[in-house]
Amino acid sequence: MFRRFCDIISFTLVHRRDAISYARSLGVKLGSGCRILDHPRYVFGSEPYLVSLGDHVTVTSGVRFVTHDGGVWVFSRPVPGY
């Protein structure tokens, strides 16, 4: 918890202007005019390359994209008993 707190403070003080570049370095596809108001490391989940956002999107603090939860519930209808 303390490490996450330090990461957020560091990001806020030093890297906030570059959140878009950092998110893109993680593999996030972002349109033009986007804003990210939290540390991208915690926003885009374990597989950020699966996230694509259009133009003029704001991702507010506290938003989390769940890109992979390990669940197999998506197969429960086409493959009963899986």
Image (cartoon, helix red, strand yellow):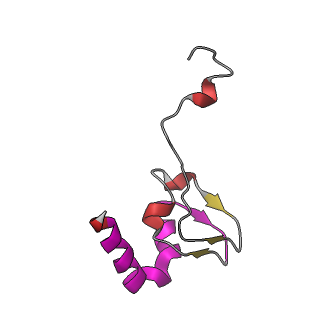
**Residue 40 in the image: x percent, y percent?**
47, 67
Q: Is residue 14 magenta?
A: yes
Q: Nearer the viewer, residue 73 or 35?
A: 73
Say which residue appears at 59% left-offset and 56% top-offset.
51
Residue 29, compared with residue 12, is above or below; it is above
Residue 82, compared with residue 24, is above or below; it is above
The answer to whether residue 29 is left or right of residue 19 is right
The answer to whether residue 56 is left or right of residue 69 is right
> Magenta stretch mostly in which secondary structure?
helix
**Residue 1 in the image: x percent, y percent?**
31, 62
**Residue 26 in the image: x percent, y percent?**
46, 62
Say which residue appears at 36% left-offset and 78% top-offset.
9
**Highlighted magenta segment, given as a residue range:** 4-32
The answer to whether residue 48 is left or right of residue 2 is right
Q: Is residue 68 magenta?
A: no
The quarter holding residue 3 reads: bottom left
Extreme residue in the top direction: 81
Rendered-image quadrant of the C terminus = top right
